[in-house]
Amino acid sequence: MKEVAAIVTRKEVAELAGVSEATVSRVFNDVGPMKEQTRLRVLQAAKTLNYHPNAIAQSFARRRSGNLGVVLPYVPKVHIFSTYYFSEVLSGIGEQVKASGYDMLLKFRAPGEESDYSSIFRSQKVDACVILGATDTPSERAELKKLEDGGFPFCLINQHMSGEWFNEVDADHEGGSYRAVRHLLDLGYRDIAFLSGSPEFSNSGDRLRGYMQAMREAGLLPADAKAPGDLPAHLYYEGNYSRTSGMKAAAAMHPHLNRIDAVFASNDRMAIGLMQGLREYGHVPGQDYAIVGYDDSEAARVTVPPLTSVAVPFYEMGRLAAERVLGRVGGGNETGGASESFRLKLDTKLVVRQSCRILR
Amino acid sequence: MKEVAAIVTRKEVAELAGVSEATVSRVFNDVGPMKEQTRLRVLQAAKTLNYHPNAIAQSFARRRSGNLGVVLPYVPKVHIFSTYYFSEVLSGIGEQVKASGYDMLLKFRAPGEESDYSSIFRSQKVDACVILGATDTPSERAELKKLEDGGFPFCLINQHMSGEWFNEVDADHEGGSYRAVRHLLDLGYRDIAFLSGSPEFSNSGDRLRGYMQAMREAGLLPADAKAPGDLPAHLYYEGNYSRTSGMKAAAAMHPHLNRIDAVFASNDRMAIGLMQGLREYGHVPGQDYAIVGYDDSEAARVTVPPLTSVAVPFYEMGRLAAERVLGRVGGGNETGGASESFRLKLDTKLVVRQSCRILR
DNA sequence: CACAGTAATGTACGCGCGTTCATTATCTCA
DNA sequence: TGAGATAATGAACGCGCGTACATTACTGTG
C-alpha cells in the first residue's frame, strides 16, 4: 500500500519555477547574484514539490562527505558507551560536529582485525577523523603514520604517541596524578599503593609517572625509581579500568592492607570496584584506608564515602578535537603547506571529597 | 610538504590491468562470471595502485547510503551519552550495525527546532533510522506520520505511541513497575510513594500504571484510581530522570516521610539523588525507608545500600531495533506491499538488592 | 543612442560508480 | 568443422549535483 515517496530532483524544481537547473542550485547554495524574485520563485517551487537536495549527490559533486568519523575501540564485553570517558568525549564531539554543520559517523574497530585506519579515509566517507582508544603498538603506529603520510586530517584523543607528531588532544594526567598523590601525602599518608590501568594506553603510563614523582619527592622511593618494577610489590597493582578488575585487585591487595594506608586508583570504576572488594574483607574506605580515584565521573559523587578524584575535561577534549580537525578539512595545501598541526594538553583538577580522612 | 594522496579511480586500475572499467567493477562487486585470471590481474593492479572504491560514489550510484541514522534528543545540560539508557541502546545499535555492514550516523535533534524527521530521510544520507527519546506531542506525531507515509523505514525505541502503528521496540515497563511495587508490598510496605519521570515519555506513564495497579490490587487505592491526581499528594512526586531532580524531590518528600515507608523511583539516577537528598535530612535508605529504582544501571550496584532495581534489556533493544529496521531497507514494495511492521516489547526483570529491608 | 560594464541566468560537463545491453571469446555436441 | 549455447568482456549511460564558462538582460555614462 505504502508508496516510497518519489525523489524530487533539481530538474523538476527548475521546470516548475521556469528556470534552469543551475539557478536552482545557486538558490540553494546561495552563490552568485540573483534576482530576489527568481529566488522566491524557486523556493516556492521547491516547497510545492517538497524538494530537498540529495546529500549523497552533493557529497559526490563536492567531493566532501560532510561527515566526521569517530573511531571507537572494540572493548570485549564492555558496552563501550557506558564508560564515562567515552560518553563524555562523544558528547563533546557531538556538540561541535553539530555546530560545524557536520554529521558524526561512528566506526567500530573490529575485534580481531588490525585497525585499518587508512581505509576509512580512502573510502571517502569521512572528511576527517577522531580516534579514540588508540593503543601504542607498532602496528597502530604504522597505520597512523600511513594516515599522516596520506595527508588525512585526524586526531588522537587522550592518547599520546611519544616520538610522533600526530595531532593530539590530551589531558595532563601526569600532573593530575601527581597532585592526587601529593594530596594523600599532604594528609599524612605514606604507604600509598597504585592501581594501574591497562598499560597499552599512554595515559596509564602518565598516571604512573605522576605517582612515582610524588613518591620520590616525598623520599618514599629511590631517586632513580622509574618502572613499576622499582616499586615494592605490595604497592603496585594492575587492572584494566573495569570495575571488576578493581574487585580483583582487592583480593590481591587485601593481605597487604596492614602495610598500605592509601590507594591511588587510575580510574573511578576501578576505585569503586576496589572499595567494594575491600569492604567485603571488612576494610572501610575513608576510614581503614584512604582512596583517590580518577575521572571525576558521576559515580564518584554517589559512593559512600564520596570519592576524591581527578577531574578531566573529557567533554571539552572531544569538542576541541572535533573543532580542530574539522578546521583542517580541505585547508592546508593552498597556503603553501600543511595547516598547523596541534597537540593540546588540557588541565586536570583534583576534586576533594570524603574518601581521605585527615591524619594530622 | 605533505601531499594529499591522489585519488585512485577505477579507470586507472582498468588501464593497468588492461581491462575495461566494467570489469574492475565486476571484480569488486563479485558479479557475473569471470576468468579467475583476470580477476587476479585486476586485484593485483588495484593493490599496486592502492585502489579503494569511493564509498560516496558507490552510495550515489547504488542510491543507498549504507548508513543507519540514529536520532538523539537534545537534553539540555546533560551529556546525553552519559545516561545509562542511551549508552546501552547505542551500544546495542552499534553492535548490530557493524554486523550488518552498515555505518552509524548520529543526528542530534536541535534545541529549539521542531524535529524535522523527514528531512533526515529526504537528504538520503541514511537508509533507515532509529529514533531515541521521541516525545508524544502532536507535532512529533505528525512528523512521524509523515515518515510513515513516505514509506521510510524507521523505528522508535522505548517509546510507544498509542493509537499509531509505528515500528517500535519497547520494554514492559508497566509490568516491571508492577513487580517492583509488588515486591515492596510483599515485604510489608504500605505507604509507598512514587517518583515519576518526565510525563512526555510514554514509559513514564507505563511506570505510573504499573504502580497504580499494584497499589489498587493491594487495596491501597480506590479501584477507579487512574491518574496522578487520584493519589494522595504526599505519595506522588515528579522529576525529570536526572539525579538533581531526585535531590529536589527529597526536599519535597522529607516533610512527609513520617507517612511514607517506601519509594518507587522511575529510574536509578533519581533514586540515587533522592537517597542523597534524604540522607542530608537524616533519613537512611534501606533502614528508615525502602527504595526501589529502575534501569538496573551500574550505579545501582555501587550505592550503599545496593539498590533494588528493575533491569531493562536496553542493549538488546538497540540491537533488535537496528536489526529489524535494517531488514526493511529496500524490501517491501516488490513483495506486493510493505514488509512486516513490528512492535516488540521486551521483558523487564526485578533485581533484588539490599535497599529494602524485610519488614515481616 | 551606443557602449562598456555588470547582473542574472543558461549550457554543458564531469564527479566515480553500478548496470544494461551489445559484443566477442570459448566451449559443447553433433 | 560448424552451429548454437554460454562465458567473458567492453561500450555507454545515468545517478543528482556543483560549477566553469557562455550568453543574455540590464544599468549607467558620454
Image (tube, coloured by chain):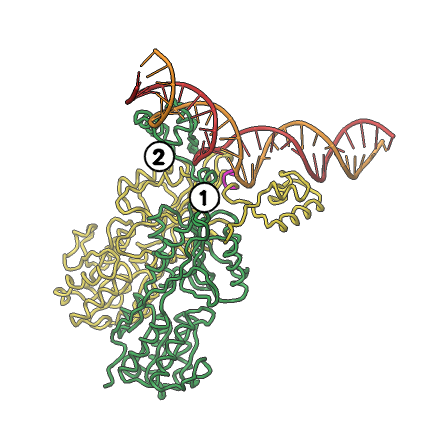
Chain colours: A green, B yellow, C orange, D red
Report the magenta stretch's main SS: helix
Q: Chain of mark 2?
A: A
Which mark, by number, is residue A30?
2
Q: Which corner quadrant holds the N terminus of chain A?
A: top left
Between A66 and A294, the one lying in front of the other is A66
**Position of residue B213 in the picture relative to residue A243 (left or right):** left
The residue segment tinted magenta is B58-62
For mark 2, give the secondary structure.
loop
According to the image, label 1 marks what residue? A64
B304 left or right of B153? left
Label 1 near label 2: C-beta < 8 Å? no
Any mark on residue A146, and which? Answer: none
Q: Does residue B302 sit above or below A342 in this rendering?
A: below
Find out whether residue B59 is within the magenta segment: yes
Residue type at tag 1 = Arg
Identify residue type, mark 2. Asp
Q: Is residue B229 magenta?
A: no
